[in-house]
């Protein structure tokens, strides 16, 4: 069976990520100066170099999770992945019992904290709440993806607000 996928990119924090990486680059340049100075005989600069490496890591490591994408893949069932630049993790794999219901615009704006929001708000896109035994997830599905889910799992769409 061929697969169908939707992708949402969460890059709101991209300016922060860029600023942190620019600072880390500046620290790298300073570290090079400390390294050259330490090799030339000023051994105290090795301590500064060590502190610079720690600072560089402290600036770079948080940037790995600042921007990511969420990808819905339907291939013999729905799987939702969070995709980082360095890895991908499975968030949701629909199986077993679950309910699916459409959310109204008001419900979309005020999702409870227990609901994991797995989409990027794009205007009037329809949002659906999927409640499983593992938790509740808010997904922005297009008509085709919704039809695939409903037909594959033999489900019916609950009335708006029934499970929210």
Image: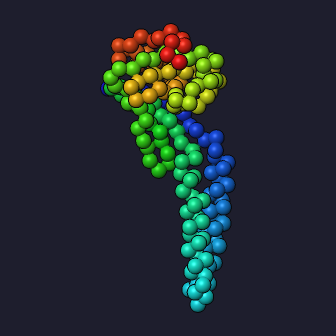
Closest to the observer, 72 or 96: 96
* Residue 32 in view in this figure: no
Q: Residue at x 57, y 58 (%)?
A: 60
* Residue 120 in view in this figure: yes
Closest to the observer, 76 or 65: 65
Instruction: State the quadrant of the N terminus.
Output: top left
Q: How is the image coloured?
A: rainbow
Q: Residue at x 38, y 30 (%)?
A: 93
Residue 96 percent across, percent down from the top left: 32, 23
Residue 11 percent across, percent down from the top left: 61, 41
**Drawn side of residue 146 relative to residue 50, left or right:** left
**Drawn side of residue 141 relative to residue 156, left or right:** right
**Drawn side of residue 95 relative to residue 25, left or right:** left
Closest to the observer, 6 or 77: 77
Residue 100 percent across, percent down from the top left: 45, 17
Q: Is residue 91 above or below residue 124?
A: below
Q: Residue at x 61, y 82 (%)?
A: 45
Q: Residue at x 66, y 59 (%)?
A: 22
């Amino acid at each position: 069976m061929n697969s169908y996928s939707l992708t949402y990119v969460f890059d709101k924090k991209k300016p922060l990520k860029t600023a942190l990486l620019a600072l880390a680059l500046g620290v790298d340049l300073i570290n090079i100066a400390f390294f050259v100075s330490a090799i030339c005989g000023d051994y105290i600069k090795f301590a500064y170099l060590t502190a610079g490496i720690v600072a560089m890591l402290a600036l770079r490591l948080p940037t790995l999770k600042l921007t990511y994408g969420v990808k819905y893949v339907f291939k013999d069932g729905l799987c939702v992945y969070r995709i980082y630049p360095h890895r991908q993790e499975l968030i949701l794999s629909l199986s077993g019992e679950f309910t699916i219901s459409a959310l109204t615009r008001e419900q979309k704006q005020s999702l409870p904290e227990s609901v994991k929001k797995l989409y990027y708000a794009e205007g009037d896109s329809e949002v659906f709440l999927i409640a499983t035994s593992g938790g509740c997830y808010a997904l922005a599905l297009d008509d085709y993806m919704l039809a695939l889910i409903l037909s594959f799992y033999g489900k019916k769409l609950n009335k708006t607000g029934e499970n929210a």
